[in-house]
Image (tube, grey):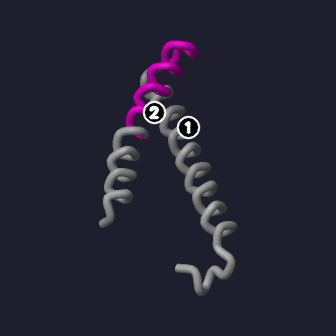
Amino acid sequence: MRADAVLLLAVGSVFFPSVLFLSKRLIQHFLVCSQSDAVIAATRFVSSLQSVLASAAGFTIVFSCSDLVQDQ
């Protein structure tokens, strides 16, 4: 793997669990709900965030290529 990919993997491995932890804490604090409800809501939030970022990356790749078959 290239250094860029390793760095991206490392950042993602820290970023998403951190977002999960912080969102669980914030949901539990502001909505005053049980820990299990906060975990479910935080997990759904992180899942939505991952899907939005993956879609944005896909759109960026598709629109930056002039020919999807030849540009690999």
Which of pointers 1 and 2 lies earlier in the amino acid sequence? 2
Q: Which labelled disc corresponds to residue 45?
A: 1
- The residue depicted at 57 percent of the width and 16 percent of the height is 31
Q: Does the magenta stretch include residue 9?
A: no
Q: Which mark is residue 26?
A: none
Residue at figure coordinates x 53%, y 48% from the top left:
50
First to last magenta residue range: 16-33
- Total marks placed: 2
- Magenta portion: prevailing SS class: helix
> Horizontal and vertical percent for residue 25?
45, 20
Q: Residue furthest toward the bottom? A: 70
Disc 1 is placed on an element classified as helix
**Which secondary structure, mark 2?**
helix
Question: Which residue is more in the foreground, 57 or 26?
Answer: 57
For mark 2, does the 10 Å Cα neighbourhood hold few (<14), some (14 to 19), or many (20 or more) residues?
A: some
What's the CA distance linking mark 1 and mark 2? 9 Å
Q: Position of residue 71 (x, y in %)?
A: 57, 80
- Residue assigned mark 2: 19
Identified by mark 1, the residue type is: Phe
Q: In front here: 45 or 59?
A: 59
Of 7 and 12, nearer the camera is 7
Which residue does the image show at 35% across and 39% down from the upper left?
14
Q: Nearer the viewer, mark 1 or mark 2?
A: 2
| Amino acid type for the residue under numbered disc 2 | Val
Q: In this view, does 49 lie above or below 3?
A: above
